[in-house]
Amino acid sequence: MSAPRAAVVGAGVSGAACAQVLRAAGIEVRVVDRGRRPGGRLGTRRVELAGGGEHVVDTGAAYFTVSDEAAGGADGGATGAPASAAAFAGTVSAWSSAGLATPWTDTLSLLGPDGPRGSTTGPQRWSAPGALRSLVTDHLLEGLDVETGRAVRSVGVADGRPALDGEPVDAVVLAMPDPQAGRMLDVGASPGLAAARRVLSRAWDPVTTVYAVWDEPWWPALTAGFVADDDLLSLVADDGARRGDGAPVLVAHTTGPAALEHLGDPDALVAPVLERLGAVLGVASPPAPRSAAAHRWSFASPQEAHEQPHLLTAVAGGLLGVCGDGWAATASGKPRVEQAWRSGHELGRALAERLA
Ligand SMILES: Cc1cc2nc3c(=O)[nH]c(=O)nc-3n(C[C@H](O)[C@H](O)[C@H](O)COP(=O)(O)OP(=O)(O)OC[C@H]3O[C@@H](n4cnc5c(N)ncnc54)[C@H](O)[C@@H]3O)c2cc1C
């Protein structure tokens, strides 16, 4: 069997978006991910509810938003909105029509260590009835050749072309945070790989997510709330409200420093987070949960995004591309689902043109 022409490492939003563009351009593409399931930071966990039912918790991204760049809004209007803005808006429209994504709320609570402080209205936040991971598994990866459970060890050079663990291809795409992409590069194999490694040097912050299930809700009505002035929590979401099934499940994201302090033992954060939840939600003695657990995201968000929407560079007789939410594919440059998708989409277009 001949080698695929392009290999995309990373089956999160950005890798899936990139691979779809390559496939549509007639390029043979294979997607590889080390995870048991695709989706990356659109993470989910299944929990058991009182009475035996199940509920899928969003443990990664809390929601997604759609910028107004496609409509020629404040940012897009000045410079002309990139085609990827309209393409992302079109994709969200397809998710909505298929029932995969629904508008959730534009109003979030403001919380502090001393309790609720009011609310704030902002852009429409979208959620997914089947959890955010389903956007990748049930739509973005459709029709693609995907191999999960395979951790790529090295990107080097073989037979004069870039190679994935020694297997040569015409193009390699790394769709993931800088620290994960950079450590794969065999910098001695080609000057192109050494140069790419120097670019992939941005530092990323961790977040630990604590999620817990109760028999019934004990907190005041909530969609989600930003937590300010707190050393432990940054965001709290009511996952039953987000999912639409009313399940009594809270999801709390820690601050970066709190996650960093317990990077080797994220479970140590469960008890203090549960205690702090009562304080920020203004309830003196919340009941103990039926179950609670933690998930560590070692590379949750970049301290600073790259200025370009992606990296595309020559390696031996082929190409190396890098994309993801750490690349400024949106006007805001914020590491979000839209930015990841658009970075992957734009890299796919640029790569398809070069490979054609
Ligand atoms: C706690 C948290 C909260 C967030 N909240 C929001 C939010 O509210 N709104 C929003 O828009 N965004 C939010 N985000 C950001 C959003 O999740 C990301 O922007 C988006 O999911 C990034 O997608 P990606 O494809 O760039 O990277 P990822 O999803 O990280 O995908 C990278 C993939 O590469 C794979 N991989 C890495 N190394 C290897 C290897 N060696 N071999 C094979 N595979 C490998 C990983 O398994 C992973 O699947 C949040 C993120 C976190 C962690």
Image: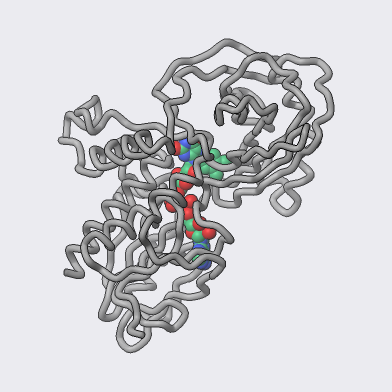
List x then y, in percent, for residue 204.
Answer: 52, 49
> Which of the two residues, 77 or 108, is positioned nearer the viewer here?
108
- Determine the residue positioned at 16% across, 69% down: 356
Instruction: Judge by depth and name the residue closer to the eye, 169 or 113.
Output: 169
Find the residue positioned furthest to the top.
118
Question: Quick one: which residue is furthest to the bottom in this view?
Answer: 159
- Viewer-closest of 195 and 337: 337
Residue 264 is left or right of residue 142, and the answer is right
Image: 226 above or below 38: above
User: In percent of the image, x 38 and y 38: which residue is there?
Assistant: 98
Horizontal side of residue 353 vs 341, given as left or right: left
Q: Quadrant of the N terminus?
A: bottom left
Q: Quadrant of residue 141?
A: bottom left
The answer, for residue 179, to whether it is visible in the render is no
x, y percent for residue 352: 21, 63
Q: Position of residue 70 (x, y in %)?
A: 23, 33
In this rendering, is residue 323 above or below 237? Answer: below
Most foreground residue, 164 or 249: 249
Query: In this rendering, does residue 160 appear at all?
Result: yes
Rendered view: 54 above or below 263: above
Query: Would you say 236 lies left or right of 278 here?
Result: left
Q: Name which residue lies at 36% across and 43% down.
A: 339
